[in-house]
Amino acid sequence: MVASHNGLFAAEFQVHTLVQAFFIIQCIWTGVMGTLVTYDPTFSPINDTGSFVRKGHQEGEDKDRVFVHPNVRGAWSVRGGSMFLVAAGALFFGTRETYLVAMAAIIWREAYDSIEMFLYMKDWQKILIKPWMSPIGPMPPLLSFNVCNALALWAILKAD
């Protein structure tokens, strides 16, 4: 057993308590949103919802070519579940490596969301650069999440 440093959770290195609080928020946010959006895809603030017809569909063909909320149920349940697991895993195992793996996953997901939203969403500024209302309450702009991610990564890398 290695020596542990205490914040909110024991860790093998001196991870800042704010980083651990950030990971707890990640667990709650992604877990709750993953569950909510799997239950009702219209809760998704960043995905297109509705019925989509596969290209090449002709009138009168079978209904298997019509998909309802195709990118939401698959995306949020996997996204929410995976982000919950990496953040909870970092808090549970407490190694610098698990924190770094969690941060890599979190940074990838939120940076990708921001880039995709900027390039393809019609009203991207509503969520990306302005405060917005999510199904679980008011949220800061999505770009601010990326700033928090960068600060948390820096704190993990600099911790003794």
Image (cartoon, rainbow, N blue to C red):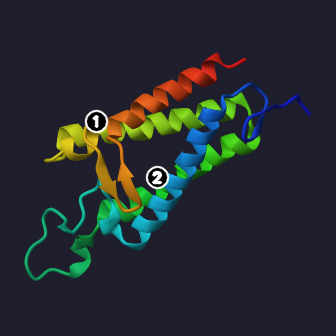
Q: Is residue 104 above or below residue 32?
A: above
Q: Residue at the spot x=53%, y=46% of the render?
A: 26
SS class of the residue under badge 2?
A: helix
> Residue 79 — which label?
2
**In the picture, residue 39 is in which quadrant?**
bottom left
Q: From the viewer's side, name the closer residue of 105 and 133.
A: 133
Q: Is residue 151 above or below residue 106?
A: above
Q: Residue at the spot x=67%, y=35% of the render?
A: 98
Q: Kindly tell me whether residue 86 is visible in this rendering.
A: no
Q: Is residue 78 above or below residue 5?
A: below
Q: Amino acid at mark 2?
A: Arg
Q: Amino acid at mark 1?
A: Ile
Q: Please give left or right for residue 145 compared with residue 45 in the image.
A: right
What is the x, y in percent for residue 107? 46, 34
Q: From the viewer's side, name the closer residue of 113 and 153.
A: 153
Q: Residue at the spot x=73%, y=17% of the render?
A: 160
> Residue 115 — which label?
1
Q: Please give left or right for residue 74 compared with residue 7 in the image.
A: left
Q: Residue at the spot x=24%, y=58% of the render?
A: 48
What is the x, y in percent for residue 43? 33, 65
Q: Kindly tell me whether residue 14 is visible in this rendering.
A: yes
Image quarter hosting the N terminus: top right
Q: Please give left or right for residue 91 compared with residue 119 in the image.
A: right
What is the x, y in percent for residue 159? 67, 19
Q: From the viewer's side, name the closer residue of 64 and 145.
A: 145
What is the x, y in percent for residue 134? 34, 57
Q: From the viewer's side, name the closer residue of 141 and 79.
A: 141
